Image (cartoon, helix red, strand yellow):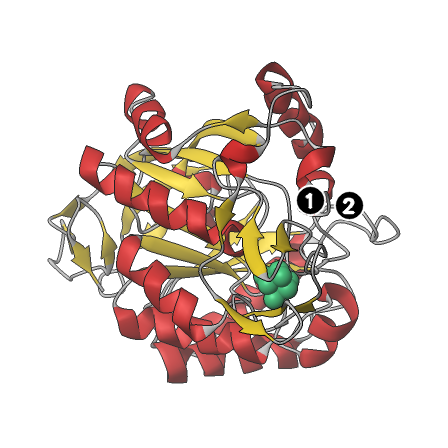
Amino acid sequence: MERRVFLQGLALPCILGAAESDARFIAEAKFYEKLPYRKIKCKLCPRECVIDDRERGYCGVRENRGGVYYTLVHSRVCAQHADPVEKKPLFHFLPGSMAYSVATAGCNVNCKMCQNWDISQSRPEQVNAEYLPPKNLAAAAKQSRCASIAYTYSEPVVFLEYVLDAAEAGRAAGVKSVVISGGYVQPEPLKELCRRVDAIKIDLKAYSEKFYREVVNGEMKPVLNALVAIRKAGVWSEIVYLVVPTLNDSDDEFRGLARWVKTELGPDVPVHFSRFHPEYLLKNLPPTPLATLERAKAVCDAEGLRYVYLGNVPGHPAENTYCPKCRRVVVERTGFIVRGMALDAGKCRYCHQPVPGVWDGASRV
Ligand code: SF4
């Protein structure tokens, strides 16, 4: 089943109906600056939208009302589902656990290959949503036996106030929080996010400003800065790179990415090369050939990255985690299923080499 159809199916039982007031979803935004004439400047993402009274920013989920800026999507959940954390994908974070995954409408970029464009490119009024305040979300996660809440499917940066409050409620209830984001965010909100959540997966869309400009409608530099800041904050992070045939699949780009990761983040940050399927505005391109994914991995392996995975190719050996010293399998996976683990307190069972990650609640970054 297509992911979009699946998400729509999830949203349908959650219909609240336009008749209900939306006041419950509105909260003052956290990161903005007041300007003369009741204008505001949003300081949440590098777009820094300047917004007149009664107007919204680019993401469509934040509105200036009389010189005060509001989020319209606090607790306004349009998709919710318990997923394996491997589906996010996070491979070094509580393997085999479930993540209670939620989204609201809206996004601060417009990727031509977006898999969830029907919610990411919609305004809040255009999608069915449920009122799910932070405490209820934490309770739902616990009830579903999820170790974490995942803010995912669309772009958590544009519903940051909800993420911060829900992560706090989750912590109080003993549930962790993981963020699945494009990383197009300003340093201050990112700092606050890092204080509240336990892992962040960044979709690095390419290693080229041209791709960001032409395919994403964003910029790469702020995303690279965000990755460095997350690493410095000591929050567990992983990178996903969706390989789009002809657009971001050259050896030079893979090599540039690998060298940047190794230098700026270190060789232990997992990098997942994921298979593209024709979607949204890039239906003219074929799925990524397996040989291209394997080439990406070979380039990064040769550059010294220690944990390079392939995604959307169930059954491939590059889904497993290998001990960097003795090369034996320490986490065996098929698709999103964990088949076996040979890690004791974060160390390889065979040679005792530490493997970085959050394996049992303790972070070993
Ligand atoms: S979060 Fe939305 S309103 Fe704020 S700068 Fe980014 S796109 Fe504009």
Q: Identify residue for label 1.
A: 115
CB-based contact (under 8 Å), mark 2 and mark 1: yes
Left or right: residue 254 versus residue 175 is: right
Q: Quadrant of the C terminus?
A: bottom left
> Is residue 90 shown to the viewer in this render?
no
Q: Quadrant of ligand 1?
A: bottom right
Res. 16 visible in picture: yes
Q: Is residue 353 above or below residue 115?
A: below
Amino acid type indicated by mark 2: Glu
In the structure shown, which secondary structural element does the residue marked by tag 1 occupy?
loop
Q: Quadrant of the N terminus?
A: top right
Dot 1 surroundings within 10 Å: few (below 14), some, or many (20 or more)? some
Judging by the rendered image, the residue that carries numbered circle 2 is: 279
Q: CA distance from mark 2 to mark 1?
A: 6 Å
Question: Relative to residue 73, is residue 160 drawn left or right?
Answer: left
Give me the residue at 39% from left, 76% from top. 228
**Is residue 79 positioned above or below 184 on the image?**
above
Element class at badge 2: loop
Q: Residue at x 80, y 46 (%)?
A: 280
Q: Amino acid at mark 1?
A: Gln
Q: Quadrant of residue 23?
A: top right
In the foreground, 155 or 356: 155
Please state the horizontal and vertical placement of residue 282, each as a whole percent of the image: 82, 53
